[in-house]
Amino acid sequence: MTNISVKDLSDELRRAINKIEQTEGLEKVGIVIRVGDGVAWIHGLSKAGYSEMLEIETDDGVSEAFALNLMEDEIGAVLLDSESKVRAGAKVRLTGKALEVPVGEELLGRVVDPLGRPLDGGPEIKTKQTGLVEKPAIGVMGRQSVNEPLMTGILSIDAMVPIGRGQRELIIGDRQTGKTAIAIDTMINQAKQNTGVVNIYVAIGQKLSKVASLIDRLKEEGVLKQTIIVATSASDPASLLYLAPYAATAMGEYFRDNKKHALIIYDDLSKHAVAYRQMSLLLRRPPGREAYPGDVFYLHSRLLERSAKLSDDLGGGSLTALPIIETQAGDISAYIPTNVISITDGQIFLETDLFYQGLRPAISVGLSVSRVGGSAQTKAIKSVSGDLRMKLAQFRELASFAQFGSDLDKDTKSQIELGQRLTEILKQAQFSPLSVWEQYVSIYAVTEGLFNEVPVAKIQEARTALLSYIKKKHKKLIDTLNTGAKPEDEVKETIKEAAKEVASEYKG
């Protein structure tokens, strides 16, 4: 037996260890031990990171997945492709990368899936940049308070529940009460008013027929060219439904970070939470309230916090979020609604009863609020809508008492009549957003009593006639009001004269 010195032995061992470290070991290569329901369980890969991309070897190439459950002896990965390709025993490799999606202006006018693959039959999308699907929100010092208006074109919202750029305003209500309609009208208004705001619409588990009709409408209105649609259907895997809002937010952040403004609509986050619950249960996470996992609040908070108005040092761009939540029987105290209400800067609540009464949009004045939008509201609209909410609230209270008796004093009668006229003026057909001057004139004509002699049933007709009259004879007034500045007395006098002339034709 040859004598080996301790030094030689240690050198030999060191060389062997280095050789092993250079080869693939369990830390870099894992093995699929079981697969099913869109989830692969992988042994090894102890250094895998949360949401890291994995490559699984298949017979016809490579299948992609991302790590979501990180445990000591195995990890749970969610498949992005069909699970039929993946078999137990397949090798899995770490990529060292988090999931990324294409971002940039090349996506405008296109319909894509959450991975940026085209769904509109158009050519493959090639962008210069990619964005991280999961990304930390901008810090406190990188933000500024909401100070620029984002006009929806919907009179009742812009007057009573104003939205500013960088705000997160929840749209909440039961099924078929007009939630998506508000979002679409807001998108249309950005194009009609040439605001330059990019629209991003995220369809989460929606019917494909609904998405198709939306696309057709946006084409018809000339809005699609400044819109990105990220679409998933109910038949898509839960992984794509889960990724959709995060991927779309990454696309929106591109515009925000390049000194532009973007509006993102999540339709809807109820379905997103359900998809996450499905994934979590398949990954054997312990269920909590309503079977949702314990981190479902974090699911939406880390998403919505990415919407912000950036500081001037960072370019002053903004990403405004309009998340949609569907309630059951008007219950806003359910788990997911209360979570999202606490994360957002206010909510627009759509009431089923109002909807069936013909009040559209069916916005509940009492339950709707904008916590930060008031500072971004245009001075023109603010000057005429200051006490609008109070007047409507008083009217609804008085109207409920008035039905029990006919003997009402003069002041009560006048309040009820004003409330009826305000309710009528706030009615608005879909796909017909109003500009700033149209909103100002509409509210001013009613609140100043200029339409007092017009029967309630003819208020809408009189408003249309007044707007047409001003459009024909006072174009300078339109330009003045559209600046958003508080109008001078001269402007108000012109509107008064025009309103009196129109009102005389519609007297009861």
Image (cartoon, grey):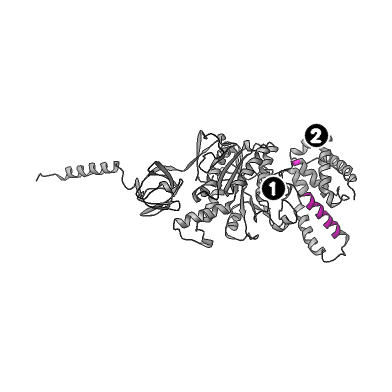
* Magenta stretch bounds: 412-436
Q: How many marks?
A: 2
Q: Residue furthest left?
A: 1
Q: Residue at x 55, y 46 (%)?
A: 232
Q: Residues within 10 Å of mark 1 (few under 14, many from 20)?
A: many
Tag 2 secondary structure: helix
Dividing the picture into quarters, in which one does residue 138 lie?
top right
Res. 321 visible in picture: no
Q: Is residue 467 magenta?
A: no
In the image, what residue type sits under mark 2?
Lys
Q: Position of residue 13 (x, y in %)?
A: 21, 44
Q: Residue at x 58, y 37 (%)?
A: 110
The residue closer to the viewer here, 193 or 312, is 193
Q: Position of residue 437 (x, y in %)?
A: 77, 40
Q: Is residue 122 left or right of residue 347?
A: left
Contact flag, marks 1 and 2 (Cβ < 8 Å): no
Q: Residues within 10 Å of mark 2 (few under 14, many from 20)?
A: few
Res. 101 visible in picture: yes
The dominant secondary structure in magenta is helix
Earlier residue among tags 1 and 2: 1
Q: Is residue 430 magenta?
A: yes
The residue closer to the viewer here, 56 or 172, is 56
Q: Residue furthest bottom?
A: 404
Q: Position of residue 469 (x, y in %)?
A: 84, 38
Give the label on residue 364, or none.
none
Q: Which residue is mark 2?
A: 476
Q: Position of residue 122 (x, y in %)?
A: 55, 35
Q: Which residue is mark 1?
A: 162
Q: Residue at x 54, y 48 (%)?
A: 303
